[in-house]
Each structure stands twice: as structure tokens, then as C-alpha cells.
């Protein structure tokens, strides 16, 4: 039953990712959908405390499986337990090498993990135990992966901005001027308002259509405003600081 | 970072599932959301043919992980490769024992697998290869698990109907009269129209709000009308035929 032969008829074409202002913005917006879906799927279950006795191991083993299937060849993906994985796998696919400098390998997943389990999850889910521990663990992992991808996408955004305005940006990097780099990434603050409005609207419209309860104790806006956007900015600045290394 | 101590404050309460006409209908509607989300997530990727060289192994290994985390203790869940799993694990959680008779263990996942890869997937995804094989494989598995859960939920629906009208149903079972059993499950045909309309509306509303392309080659209605609803009915009839064994 598992000898699958699925082949494209017209094309064996390889669609290489292109990174520019438009494509990066589009990817960030698409990741919103993924995050909102994953959040809706997680909040179907209550907290389910026994999940968390096994979650660390489940995530490690799943990441090992996904590593073998070359998930982390894609520079858009970052594992939560890189120390658990071999340092290298021969890539199966020629992913676009867009990121430059030492910042390419920035991985703040340990911080994301802490924030997720200490701050976010307890806000979003209801108390209770319905026994669906494996399902809950995988719902958490899916949501964590989507949030992590969104935040680390800041590297691609920062590289696009660097390429657009290297002359302005380079002196700030040499001076290690975090504040100036923050300002250099400013268009963002206008955009954050746009993002926030769009996210709120999606949650409202999806929520109205859903056949599941969605009485978030917290609010998706908090997720974005308090955690996702600041952590993305942190990644952007860190990336630029290491851009010339 | 992975010593997580998440505990409910007020309640260590165990919410046992109750199965009746209302709760079963509500679960089926909730599963629609899951199926639609999973479908949107899968069609983000093109066909990605190399995924299918490794998919069988990935699914087997993931199911083994989820088995250890007691996914299949819940009678609502059915593995795709049961022959790959130990026959028994001591349940962690006292799931409601609602299903009765030999039909409780019906598992048509081999058929669902065939239909999914031969008929559905090629209809929904675009040709192409973007290198995201692990992500594609897990998107397939998530969608397969949601579809499988939806179809096998037919057992719970059939048991509810049996309990409501055992006197009518029992002679049909003893006579092995499939056609009469089909008719016994009739309220369904009216409902199918309701389900189809609701699914179409959800896909339309979600699709309009999404920031991702959702140019399905196929149509979610086909998934429901041609595969999901008939396979659910098949499970219902098979379940009833074995109800007295």
C-alpha cells in the first residue's frame, strides 16, 4: 500500500524561492494563516497536563524524523533541539542561498519555547484533561513550528532591507548601534498596525464560520503584539549585527 | 528547556466524551474545520514527488511515536499501519467505551490511503517541486488523519442510531440486509445536503480571507461528495452488520 509513484506529468520543475520585498511580505502573511489554523487546532484540546511529561521527547524524535526527510535543509526552518541532530545532511534540493554572514544561523527557538509554554499556552487553552495527549503534543509542535518560522523569517526581511540600503545600514552595523538599526527597520512599525488589523480580521471571520468553540482566554492580538512582532524584530537586529561577520 | 510543569490550577478534571446525536454531529462539523485547514496547508506545497519515496516510512515512524504517546487508546483514532504497531498498550486514560460488537475495530484506512494518493491528492495540488518534502509529508499525514477520523466517526454515528432504534435495526442486521441498513441511516441524505452547503461556505469564506493562494485544481465538494460521505456510510453499514457479533 505504500509504494507510491506520484509524478508530475508536465514538469519536474524546481521552483526556487525568490526573496524580495514582495515575496517576503507575502510569506509572512501566508504564515499568519498557518499560525491561526494551528492555534484553532490546539485550542480544541484543553491544557492536558500529562502531555508535557512526554512532549520534549516527542519533539526531539519528530525533529529527528523531519531532519532525515531534509526539513532543515531549507534555511527558513529551524529545529528546537539542534543539539539533538547531526550537524549536517547533504541537501536533497538546491535551496536558494539568500542569507549572508554569521546571522544566517541565528536560532532563538529556546526563547520561543520558553515564551510559548510559560506565557502563551496557559493564556489560550482551557483547564482540563481529555486524554488526547499525542494529538495535543503534535498540535503544540505544529503551532510552535509555525511561530518559529514566522519569527526567523525576520532574517530574510532584514537581508532584503540590507540589500536595498546597504549604504545607510553598514555604518550602524560597524558601530553596533542597535537603536539605529531598530530605526532602520522602521517601515515596520506602520506595517505592524496593518498586520495586527489583518490578523484580527482573519481570526474574527474564521472564528465566525468555525464549528468549534473558540473562546480564547487570551487573544491572538496578544500573541502578535506582545511576542511575535518583538521577537521578529529581535531576530532582524541580531541578523544585521552579524551581517558583516 | 524541556522540563515543563504545566498543571491546571482549578481542575485535574477528566472530561469524558459523551456520544449522542448532538455531540456526534458537533464532532463531525468540527472535523470539517480540521479537514479544511489541513487541505489549505497541504495545497501550499506543490505535488513534490520525492516526498512519496519516503512517506510510507515517515508515517510508520510517526505513528509509532504517537502510539507510544497513546493516540490510539482513543477509539476515535485509527492508525494507517496497525500491523506496524504492538497490539496493545495499557491505556493512560479511561476513554468512554461507547462502541459495541466486532465493528468497533473496523479500520478502512488502507482504502482511504489508496483513494487519497490515487484520486484526491493529484486533483488538489499543483505540479512542481519546491524541496519541502518533510513539510509536505507531514501536511499529507495531518490531512489523512483528519479524513480518517471523520470517516471512522461513522461508527459512533451508527451506534447512536442503533441505540435510538434497536427494534427497527436489529432484524436488518440479522438478515444482513445492507440496503435496508442504508435506508435506516437515511436522515443522513438530507443532512448530506446541509453538510455540503456548510463545507462549501466555509471553504469560500476562509478562502476569501486567506493570504495564501488557494487555487485548488479540484474542489472540496468533490472530496466530501464523492469520497468522504460514501466512505463514512460504508463504515456505518459495516459497523451495524457486526453490531451483534
Image: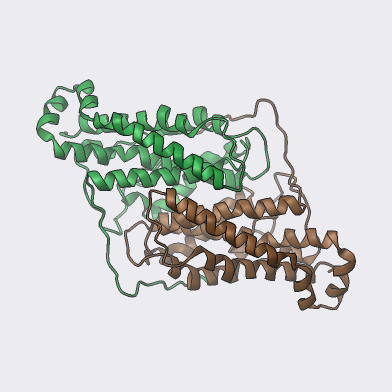
Chain colours: A green, B brown
Horizontal side of residue A142 vs A217, given as left or right:
left
Q: Is residue A231 above or below residue B165?
A: above
Place residue A9 in its image quadrant: bottom left
- Identity of the residue furthest to the left in this view: A167
Q: Residue at image x 27%, y 60%?
A: A15
Residue A87: give x, y in percent of width and height. Answer: 32, 45
- Identity of the residue furthest to the right in this view: B167
Place residue A112 in its image quadrant: top left
Is residue B61 among what the camera can see?
Answer: no
Horizontal side of residue A3 vs A168, given as left or right:
right
In which quadrant is the C terminus of chain B drawn?
bottom right
User: Which residue is at the front of the view, A70 or B156?
Assistant: B156
Place residue B244 in its image quadrant: bottom right
User: Which residue is at the front of the view, B113 or B189?
Assistant: B189
Horizontal side of residue A71 vs A95, given as left or right:
right
Q: Residue at image x 63%, y 38%?
A: A46
Residue A227: give x, y in percent of width and height. Answer: 41, 29
Q: Residue at image x 31%, y 41%?
A: A153
Residue A245: give x, y in percent of width and height. Answer: 16, 33
Q: Residue at image x 74%, y 43%?
A: B16
Amino acid at each position: 500500500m505504500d509504494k507510491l509513484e506520484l509524478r508530475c506529468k508536465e514538469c519536474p520543475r524546481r521552483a526556487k524561492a525568490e526573496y524580495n520585498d514582495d515575496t517576503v511580505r507575502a510569506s509572512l502573511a501566508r504564515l499568519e494563516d498557518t499560525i491561526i489554523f494551528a492555534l484553532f487546532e490546539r485550542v480544541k484540546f484543553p491544557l492536558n497536563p500529562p502531555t508535557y511529561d512526554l512532549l520534549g521527547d516527542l519533539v526531539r524524535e519528530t525533529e529527528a524524523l523531519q531532519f532525515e526527510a531534509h526539513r532543515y535543509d531549507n534555511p527558513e526552518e529551524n529545529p528546537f533541539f539542534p543539539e539533538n541532530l547531526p550537524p549536517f545532511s547533504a541537501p536533497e534540493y538546491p535551496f536558494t542561498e539568500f542569507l549572508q554572514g554569521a546571522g544566517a544561523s541565528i536560532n532563538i527557538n529556546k526563547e520561543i519555547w520558553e515564551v510559548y509554554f510559560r506565557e502563551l499556552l496557559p493564556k489560550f487553552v482551557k483547564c482540563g484533561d481529555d486524554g488526547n495527549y499525542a494529538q495535543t503534543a503534535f498540535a503544540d509542535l505544529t503551532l510552535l513550528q509555525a511561530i518559529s518560522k514566522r519569527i526567523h523569517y525576520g532574517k530574510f526581511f532584514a537581508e532584503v532591507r540590507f540589500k536595498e540600503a546597504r549604504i545607510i545600514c553598514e555604518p550602524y552595523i560597524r558601530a553596533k548601534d542597535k537603536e539605529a538599526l531598530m530605526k532602520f527597520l522602521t517601515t515596520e512599525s506602520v506595517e505592524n498596525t496593518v498586520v495586527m488589523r489583518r490578523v484580527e480580521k482573519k481570526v474574527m471571520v474564521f472564528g465566525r464560520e468555525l464549528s468549534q468553540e473558540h473562546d480564547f482566554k487570551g487573544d491572538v492580538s496578544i500573541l502578535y503584539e506582545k511576542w511575535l512582532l518583538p521577537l521578529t524584530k529581535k531576530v532582524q537586529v541580531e541578523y544585521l549585527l552579524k551581517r558583516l561577520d
